[in-house]
Image (tube, grey):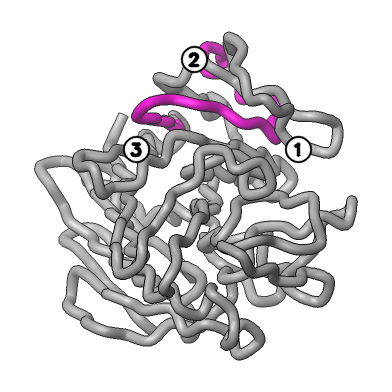
Amino acid sequence: MPEIFSQRSRLKLNEPGNQILSWIWKHPKSGKNLEILAGYDPKERFFSSGSFLMYPWVNRHTSDRIAFGEEFISLENSGTKDSKGYPSHGLAYSWRRRIIDHTDHSVFLELIPDETFSLTPLSKIRVREEYSLQTISNEEVLTLRTFFQNENLVPFRFCYGYHPYFRMNSQSPLPRLRSNMKKQIPLQEDLIPVYPIYGVETNAFELEQIPTLDSLFFGEEPNVILQVPNESYQVSIHSYANASNEIPLSYVQIYTDFRGNRIAIEPMSAPGNAVLHGFSLTTLLPEEEKSGCFQILLSTM
């Protein structure tokens, strides 16, 4: 299984390369080995632990088919469905990866499209992931950059995101959420965003206790901080785009699973149901390549 490490931490992927098995960090002050991510547990549902790619849509899609250019792909027998029957989390989450390059501190992977989509435009989008792990001053930095290249003869529109679960120690003092995001996007009862998209002011990141959430937020360069005082560290999930060919991950879905003592903080390039509405999608012209990036930074408190 692919594994990378830095001065203070070690990250392992599962054998197919589509899930993070563990990320263990040695706290520089206490010396304790802390599990930062709630690593993938193959005994559970694929979507309930670890971290996985959502692509070519994020969260939910309310149609049983999806259009790419002039072609439609049926979703009746593909992917997974939520309790409402909506196709969820895209189609590529469980695709196997092949290793292109591997060093002690980084691994470069390429997705292998499922044979089910071999005759569709989806199979002609080359998708690669680069994980890198560094210790910079007193911070541990995990960077995940994803590359998309269009080998179709026509433009391709999509969105993507990641769904990492972070472990929380919920003993007193309780963990807290802080963020620079001030806008929350209303969701309907079925968790589909209200279109046209609009934002409302939120105080979710000013509270002293994390509320129950399955909520969508927006920010130009979102930064979400999970503070775990009981173990004297904090996790910062930061997204940014520095160039015109970089895909901004301006949306963040946050889902709390207190029974599992974990929280999902999901950087995304668009809200749920975006492909159906043509909203905030990334367009790739023939032969064009774009990439998006987010980082997870660990530091002491």
Q: How far apart are marks 3 and 1 (CA)?
A: 24 Å
Q: Which of marks 3 and 1 is in front?
A: 1
Check the picture and name the quadrant holding the N terminus.
bottom left
Residue identifier under label 1: 192
Disc with the residue nearer the chain's start (1 vs 2): 2
Q: Residue 182 carries which label?
A: 2
The tally of labels here is 3
Q: How crowded is mark 3: few (under 14 residues within 10 Å), some or many (20 or more)?
A: many
Q: Label 3, on which residue? A: 238
Residue that extends furthest to the right in the rendered view of this protein: 84
Is 56 a magenta residue? Answer: no
State how far apart marks 3 and 2 are (Cα).
15 Å
User: Residue 223 magenta-drawn?
Assistant: yes
- In terms of sequence position, does the residue under pointer 3 or pointer 1 come before the other? 1
Look at label 3 and name its amino acid: His
User: In whole angstroms, how far apart are the C-alphas of marks 1 and 2?
Assistant: 20 Å
Sort mark 2 into few (<14), some (14-19) or many (20+) by Cα contacts within 10 Å.
some
Rendered location of residue 31, percent (x, y): 28, 51
Report the residue at 37% width, 35% height from top. Answer: 234
Q: What residue is rendered at 56% in x and 27% in y?
A: 217
Q: Is residue 169 visible?
A: no
Query: 236 or 147: which is nearer to us?
Result: 147
